[in-house]
Image (spheres, rainbow, N blue to C red):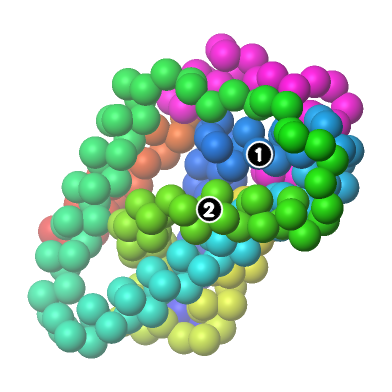
Amino acid sequence: MSISASDLAALFAAMAILAAVPSVSVAAVSARAASAGFSQGAITAMGVVAGDLVFILLALFGLALLVEALGEMFFLIRYLAAGYLLWLGLSLWRSTTRARVTDAAGDGSSWSSFMTGLMITLGDQKAVLFYLGFLPAFIQMDSLTSVDVAAVALTAVLAVGGVKLGYAFVAGRVGRRLDQRAGRLLNRVAAGVMVVVAIVMFISAS
């Protein structure tokens, strides 16, 4: 495996922080849990994670093809990815918390809960662009192996899934709305993570 334990730990922390930012998926998971119980919120979270895994795999194999096609010129992709992440981070820093946890329409079935999470994630086509920019900061794409892919996928499941399950648990037990100040703080933390990752990528590509 070419990914070090420290890189995996950094990837886990970054994914967890970004997954905690108030978003449509957070709202969906929390609404399901608040209206139909923790189990339905957890199943919705599983759908969100499944969608993320699809985008991560697309990004990893797409990047692997780019490495093969560009060879030594792949550093240009790292510059573009770093610039994209920097733009995302600055945009997130300036944004306000718009995502709200609202009532879910009825209890719904486990299948509909799962599909809600999956479709919300797959409906955001910008996610694959995000992963295309994000993953090269932690992974040496020129030495990517099947074990690396499995490790990244497992990291995403634990980080993203763990955070979404946390939202489901809190929404099921406590309430349906995320405090706006807490949401703004999470936005700022996530923005900082993106900016730091972008800077690291700029330095490593130089």
The span from disc 1 to disc 2 (Cα, nearest Å) is 11 Å
Residue 193: x and y, percent? 41, 39
In the image, residue 7 above or below residue 199: below
Asked whether residue 171 is drawn in magenta, I would say yes
Tell me residue 86's x, y (percent).
25, 41
Who's the residue at 24% across and 80% down the image? 67
Dot label at residue 98: none
| Sequence-earlier tag: 1 or 2 | 1
**Quarter the C terminus occupies:** bottom left
Judge by depth and name the residue closer to the eye, 41 or 203.
41
- What is the crowding at mark 1: few (fewer than 14 residues within 10 Å), some, or many (at least 20)? many
Determine whether, in the image, residue 58 is placed left or right of residue 15. Answer: left
User: Can residue 106 be seen by looking at this rendering?
Assistant: yes
Report which residue position mark 1 lands on. Answer: 28
Point out which mark residue 121 bears.
2
Q: Name the main secondary structure of what is drawn in magenta.
A: helix
Amino acid type of the residue tagged 2 in the rendering: Thr
Inspect the magenta stretch and tell me whether residue 8 lies in it: no
Please indicate, yes or no, whether residue 5 appears anywhere in the rendered image: no
- At 46% from the left and 86% from the top, the residue drawn is 145
- Image quadrant where residue 118 sits: bottom right
Q: Is residue 39 above or below residue 88?
A: below
What amino acid is at disc 1?
Answer: Ala
Callout 1: SS = helix
Residue 98 higher or lower than 146, as above or below:
above
Q: Which residues are magenta?
A: 163-188
Residue 162, image x, y percentages = 71, 49
Image coords of residue 5 (percent x, y):
56, 66
Instruction: Work out whether residue 80 or residue 25 is closer to the camera in this orientation and state it.
Output: 25
